[in-house]
Amino acid sequence: MLQTDLAKRIGRPIKTINEIIKGKAAITAETAIQLERALGVPAEFWNQREANYRAYLASKKELDCLVAQKDWLEQFPIKEMIERGWLQCTNDVADQMISLLNFFRVATPEQWADGWPGHKLAFRKAKNITNNIGAISIVHPFV
């Protein structure tokens, strides 16, 4: 069916139909009902496809943001955490980021940074050793 035919059947502008097909415009509940009437496919089908697509876009955007913050991983002893079974072994940066965020039970590196530096820990250390907040934090995960 041509976009023009569908637009006529559901009473929407051709531009709207084209934007829906390209993923630029969302399928509203009203449009889903109109598609059900015009195509015989239940509105729930269209609503679910729209929700799945928007969730996919949000997930892709989040992964892109996490990969852009990959430098955050460098402060943690990832190799040791994998050896201890705390993280899964993967070479994928996004998977490493997600695994580490799950370990700390935070959504983003920013939430980790907001929570960890404020933690009060008491322990002894030699004066010639510098603090590595990433290594210290894995011993006492932020809960």
Image: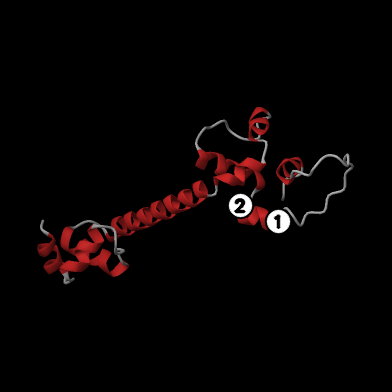
| Residue sitting nearer the eye, 141 or 35 | 141
Instruction: Please name the residue shown 66% across and 47% down the image.
Output: 104
Give the residue type at disc 1: Gly
* Residue that label 2 marks: 109
Measured from the top left, where is residue 84 in percent x and y?
Answer: 68, 29
Measured from the top left, where is residue 39 in percent x and y?
Answer: 17, 58
| Residue sitting nearer the eye, 1 or 25 | 25
Return the residue found at the far front: 128
Secondary element under disc 2, as helix, strand or loop, is helix
Q: Is residue 74 above or below residue 12?
A: above
Name the quadrant of the N terminus: bottom left
Secondary element under disc 1, as helix, strand or loop, is helix
Return the residue found at the far top: 83
Give the residue type at disc 2: Pro
Q: How many marks?
A: 2
Q: CA distance from mark 2 to mark 1?
A: 10 Å
Instruction: Please name the residue shown 29% across and 62% down the image.
Output: 24
Measured from the top left, where is residue 101 in percent x and y?
Answer: 61, 46
Q: Residue 115 has which mark?
A: 1
Q: Quadrant of residue 33?
A: bottom left
Compared across the picture, whether 45 is left or right of 110 comes to left
Q: Earlier in the sequence, mark 2 or mark 1?
A: 2
Measured from the top left, where is residue 105 in percent x and y?
Answer: 64, 49
Q: Quadrant of residue 13?
A: bottom left
Instruction: Please name the residue shown 76% across and 57% down the image.
Output: 118
Q: Residue 12 has which mark?
A: none
| Residue sitting nearer the eye, 121 or 107 | 121
